[in-house]
Amino acid sequence: MNLWRSTSLHPGWPMLVGPLRVPAGAVRLRPVRMRDAGQWSKIRLADRAYLEQWEPSTDLDWAARHTMASWPPVCSGLRSEARKGRMLPYVIELDGQFCGQLTIGNVTHGALRSAWIGYWVASSATGGGVATGALALGLDHCFGLVKLHRVEATVRPENAASRAVLAKVGFREEGLLRRYLNVDGSWRDHLLVALTVEEISGSVTSSLIRNGRASWK
């Protein structure tokens, strides 16, 4: 862990982000770790029907991709990208328990200063503001310590729940990407949404608090 800290190229990485209190409880972001294997595998296998319809297709069956033995190479790859300054891979915790992931990828500094953001949350934690709170924390971290200017995301037009979450934290739609990504066995259209630092009043989390969606307590 000390080596990981000392060799990271990211400002603001690795560190804890949050917590922020939402209706479901206290949400916090923390770096992924090897010992997440059990909870990651358990939730991903149980939530196959809920998650698989929105995630990129691969040649491997869902069950084979999400055994406990599958996590170490996944985690190692994420941490390697983080050390190189290209990614910030987080676990979403609800009241201290693993309940999903939030990943900030393709981090680019210099004149562009941008990244994409993506997330998933266990079905048992939906409807209580967990995804919204996690995204707000992640965006504030991007625009704060990581010093980014723009963050974007993609979402399928028919994914009403995720579109609502993205809208709550301030993302605006920029266009439709035709047959953008192979998801659930077919090439699917995706909406491109984005947010720049100039569009934020104070912070994303403070906007949620002002709107009664979250609190610091």
Image (cartoon, rainbow, N blue to C red):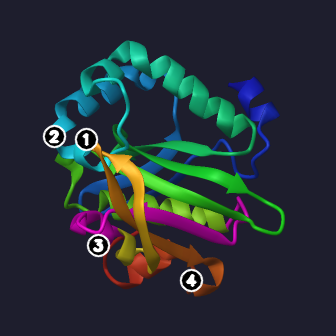
Q: Position of residue 191 (x, y in %)?
A: 40, 70
Tag 2: Cα neighbours inside 10 Å, few (<14), some, or many (≥20)? few
Q: Residue at horizontal 23%, vertical 28%? A: 45
Q: Is residue 114 located in the magenta-colored stretch of the structure? A: no
The residue that label 2 is drawn on is: 49
Is residue 149 highlighted in magenta? yes
Give the labeled residue for mark 1: 52
From the image, which quarter does the N terminus lie in? top right
Q: Is residue 99 left or right of residue 174?
A: left
Q: Which residues are magenta?
A: 144-165
Sequence-first disc among 4 and 1: 1
Which mark is in front, 4 or 1? 1
Q: Which residue is mark 3?
A: 164
Residue 20 falls in image quadrant: bottom left
**Residue at the farthest top position:** 69
Where is mark 4, residue-wise? 200
